[in-house]
Amino acid sequence: MTYKNNCSIIYAEFTKIGSGIMKNELIKTEIIVKDTPISVVRIDKTDFISLTDLAKYQNSSDPSFTVKNWLRRVSTIDYIGLWEQLHNPKFNLVEFDQIKTEYGRNSFAMSPTQWIKRTNSIGIIAKGGRYSIGTFAHPDIAFEFASWLSSEFKLYLITEFERLKINEAYQNKIEWSVKRELLKNNSSVRRLEKMDENLRLQ
């Protein structure tokens, strides 16, 4: 194997490490809103609120149905589509325009996973299957969903979420997670630098 090829491997590994910083780091906590436990996860420095848990406030037996029912509304698609255009440079506008030709029909249906797959959404995240975590959304979107459920519920949600943001224990948890990731990735970088040094000596 030539030195050039070794360098390519090292660069690829380094890129993989760099792009993976905080990608797999998920901090999960919970707030209580009107006696309803609401999960909040932090991924890549952004908080996401569980739409599945919010829906349980109105429909505890089948919250996913409530989320899908909200997603099929014209005003919902317009709102989350505009949010993506403002915050997501990789948002699929072509597919979004196609969706807008479909919504409003009685047969129109939209699930969180369909929305994510078709538009490359970043404002809504969902994981189904055996290890399902339900559907989560950026606070801007979660608050809009909560408002559709109940204006009163939305106000309580905002209050509890803001309380969480200034909670010392939660902030300490975030800081520790960041430090742990930096230490882990610095160790990997040092390992690659050592590999590079050894190859230069060969």
Image (spheres, rainbow, N blue to C red):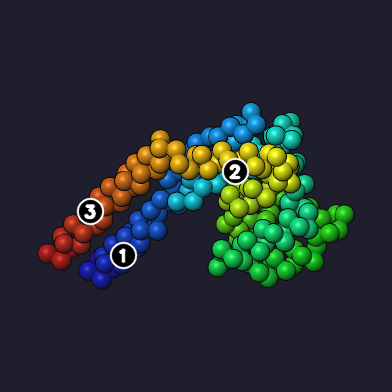
Q: Earlier in the sequence, mark 3 or mark 2?
A: 2
Residue type at mark 1: give it.
Answer: Tyr
Of badges 2 and 1, the one in the foreground is 2
Whether residue 20 is visible: yes
For the residues bearing labels 3 and 2, Cβ distance under 8 angstroms: no
Q: Earlier in the sequence, mark 2 or mark 1?
A: 1
**At 68% across and 70% down in the image, what residue appears?**
94
Residue type at mark 3: give it.
Answer: Arg
On the image, the x and y values in percent for residue 171 come to: 40, 41
Front residue of 151/32: it is: 151
- The quarter in which the C terminus is drawn is bottom left
The quadrant where residue 101 appears: bottom right
**At 59% across and 66% down in the image, what residue appears?**
86
Residue 108 placement, left or right of 201: right
Mark 1: which secondary structure? helix
For the residues bearing labels 2 and 1, Cβ distance under 8 angstroms: no
Circle 1 residue: 11
Residue 13 placement, left or right of 202: right
On the image, the x and y values in percent for residue 34 come to: 65, 31
Q: Residue furthest right?
A: 106
Q: Residues within 10 Å of mark 1 (few under 14, many from 20)?
A: some
For the residues bearing labels 1 and 3, Cβ distance under 8 angstroms: no
Residue type at mark 2: give it.
Answer: Ile
Residue 191 shows which numbered tag? 3
Between marks 1 and 3, how big is the CA–CA gap?
Answer: 12 Å
Whether residue 118 is visible: no
On the image, the x and y values in percent for residue 8 come to: 31, 67
- The quarter in which the N terminus is drawn is bottom left
Residue 158 shows which numbered tag? 2
Q: Earlier in the sequence, mark 1 or mark 3?
A: 1
Front residue of 47/65: it is: 47
